[in-house]
């Protein structure tokens, strides 16, 4: 069975609902996650359909922009750390190569071979 990935930005795939009842008229707008219907926000019932969808699209647009900015920031930080780690590992490899060469020379002198 294929494992589903967690949705990182739930608003990007959200929908809105407003219910009408005889007793109360229109309910407040509910912004819900798709599939799970988890409640993300409740907005005033007075918003028109057109206004509600403008608000939702505005929020989705800026959630995605903020997410992308955060990802770029995290990427810069991680690449800096990875570059530092890579430099450290390359230094260790060079030191090990040098130590290995010295060891090979010593062994060569003990067993009478030229290296």
Image (cartoon, grey):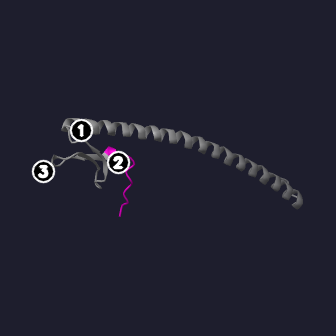
- The percent coordinates of residue 104 (x first, y second) are 81, 55
Of circles 2 and 3, which is in front? 3
Residue that label 2 marks: 10
Image-quadrant location for residue 35 = bottom left
Residue that label 1 marks: 53
- The percent coordinates of residue 4 (x first, y second) are 36, 57
Q: Nearer the viewer, residue 6 or 99?
A: 6
Earlier residue among tags 2 and 3: 2
Q: Secondary structure at mark 2?
A: helix
Of circles 1 and 3, which is in front? 3
- The percent coordinates of residue 63 (x first, y second) are 37, 40
Residue that label 3 marks: 23
Tell me the crowding category of disc 3: few under 14, some 14 to 19, or many 20 or more residues within 10 angstroms, Cα based.
Answer: few
45 falls in the magenta region? no
Question: Is residue 34 toward the left or the right of residue 98 in the image?
Answer: left
Q: Nearer the viewer, residue 4 or 91?
A: 4
**Looking at the image, residue 50 lies above or below residue 98:** above
Question: Is residue 69 toward the left or the right of residue 98 in the image?
Answer: left
Q: Secondary structure at mark 1?
A: helix
């Amino acid at each position: 069975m294929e494992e589903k990935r967690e949705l990182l930005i739930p608003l990007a795939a959200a929908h809105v609902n407003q219910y009408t009842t005889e007793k109360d008229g229109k309910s407040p707008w509910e912004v819900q996650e798709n599939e799970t219907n988890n409640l993300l926000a409740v907005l005033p019932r007075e918003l028109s359909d057109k206004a509600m969808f403008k608000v939702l699209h505005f929020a989705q647009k800026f959630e995605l922009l903020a997410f992308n900015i955060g990802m770029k920031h995290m990427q810069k930080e991680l690449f800096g750390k990875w570059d530092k780690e890579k430099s450290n590992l390359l230094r260790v490899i060079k030191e090990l190569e040098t130590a290995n060469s010295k060891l090979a020379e010593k062994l060569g002198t003990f067993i009478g071979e030229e290296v």
